[in-house]
Amino acid sequence: MISMKKTQLLDKANSRFSKKQLARLETAIDFAAQAHATQKRIGGEPYIIHPVAVAGYLCDWNLDLDTLIAGLLHDVVEDTDVELPEIEKQFGHDVAFLVDGVTKLGELRKGMREIDSYLPATKDNLTKLLIATGQDIRVIIIKLADRLNNLQTLYALPRDKQQKIALESLRVFAPLADRLNMGRVRVQIEEISFSYLDKHRFNFLKKQMKKRLGRASKKLDRVRADVAKLLNQNHIKFTMDGRIKSVYSLHKKLEKYEQNLDAIHDLIALRIIVPNKNACYQALGLINGLYTPMTDRIKDYIAMPKPNGYQSLHTTVVTPDEQIVEFQIRTERMHDYAERGLAASFHYNEQKLTDAYKKGQIAAMPANLDWIADLQKAAARLAAGQKVDTEKLRLNLFSDRIFVYTPRGDIFDLPDGALPLDFAYRVHSDVGARAQSFKVNGRIAKSDTPLKTGDVVEIITRNNIRPTIDWLKRIVTSHARQKIKQQLRRELKK
Ligand code: MN
């Protein structure tokens, strides 16, 4: 089984990489297989099946060789005796950097386990962690591949774990894939998660949809033929296929439309791919002329891309035999971008872009998600073949930051070496000003104890406490210093 999977991956990679690169990939497969040799997945399969599958997705998504290799090695440091320096020695700095990112994410998550039940904060925290450790966006993409494969083998886990992983995937990983415009991955994650979270509803909707589509299929064949004829007559090159709405997005839409299936017009959409932008508009005009368009449902996402960079023309029309059909018209490149998002851009700008990814990573603070907006803008520009100012995208990294929790599970990031009072001021300057003492991981801690990642810090406040000049010795962050000085001045005036 292992050698079969190995051959499958090498076959997949064969057309994309040189002989020398393929040899490197093979070395990495063997290295990972060796490291995981004694381990099994919960389902009983040899462990190596999992990282090979992860690398397989990364290959399908057209990621570069370093990312594929990091995918193969992503669990090695966390789960085996192999250490990072050895990976660096064997496979280079970039691979080691990516593996390290994935490993750190795993370590940070361990500190979150106890707050798993507190979902709103968990969701927020996990998103922050993903962003913080994903200094290189490829780390996040590896995590998405990892999660997708874990979902596909979810049947092997006990029910409560299934529910937990499915819920987290739906709330955190699917939106993340969406922000990166990785539409296909998003849909895969949503479908599997939803089928575990609400099996009954999933099956019910699937059946309903099948019925509808069965009834419409004859009429749709007719529409396809008519549209194909029209486009041919006008010498527009095209390919056409049908996309069936995913069960989960139908479920969400039905909630908006009071469960009325008749109100959903895009159960099936016909997707037309044409060579260029002009042909998109031309095809739109022809289709709107052939049928009766529902005017409020003509959308020009080419002129006005969606925030995640998605581009396409949409129109919903009514045919003479009263079939309602949605059309989505776009170029090959727009299509590829809609399906694979950021990952697809690698393919178009191979080298340049890898660089941009490495530098154009991360955002200001985890508290806001500006980086995603920047990333999206950059991604949209890259997809349109424009240049991106990577300088503007470069932001402070998190390598020298620690992550500390409140007892409620909220997460805050601080510079390495920060003290409890820094944390208090980071939470709120009023909390800082009234801080009397601190508990770290449940124990009273001195005010000069440096905090570590994963610490849970409780601040004990008293209303009659006032900051004194001494406090400036109990902090290291400029934020706390500035706040304390302000407060001291205010006290003085009084
Ligand atoms: Mn894994």
Image: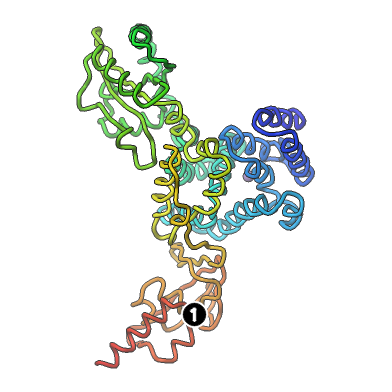
Would you identify the image quadrant in which residue 483 lies?
bottom left
Q: Quadrant of ligand 1?
A: top right
**Furthest-left residue in this view:** 295
Identify the residue shown where x is 28% and y is 12%.
Answer: 323
Up-down relation of residue 47 to residue 474 (above or below): above
Residue 208 can be seen in this image: no
Identify the residue shown where x is 54% and y is 56%.
Answer: 133
210 and 379: which is toward the camera: 379
Q: Which x, y percent locates residue 473? A: 48, 87
Residue 40 can be seen in this image: yes
**Furthest-front residue in this view:** 387
Q: Which x, y percent locates residue 475? A: 47, 82
Q: Which x, y percent locates residue 91? A: 73, 49
Up-down relation of residue 187 to residue 493 (above or below): above
Amino acid at dot 1: Val
Q: Taking 287 as reference, is 396 left or right? A: right
Count the marks: how many? 1
151 and 25: which is toward the camera: 25
Identify the residue shown where x is 65% and y is 41%.
Answer: 65
Instruction: Point out the image quarter for the C terminus.
Output: bottom left
**How many neighbours does mark 1 have within 10 angstroms: few (below 14), some (14-19), or many (20 or more)?**
some
Would you identify the image quadrant in which residue 330 lies?
top left
Q: Which x, y percent locates residue 194? A: 45, 35
Q: Is mark 1 within 8 Å of ligand 1?
A: no
Instruction: Point out the image quarter for the N terminus.
Output: top right
305 and 294: which is toward the camera: 305
Please, what secondary structure does the residue beneath circle 1 have? loop
Which residue was labeled with disc 1?
476
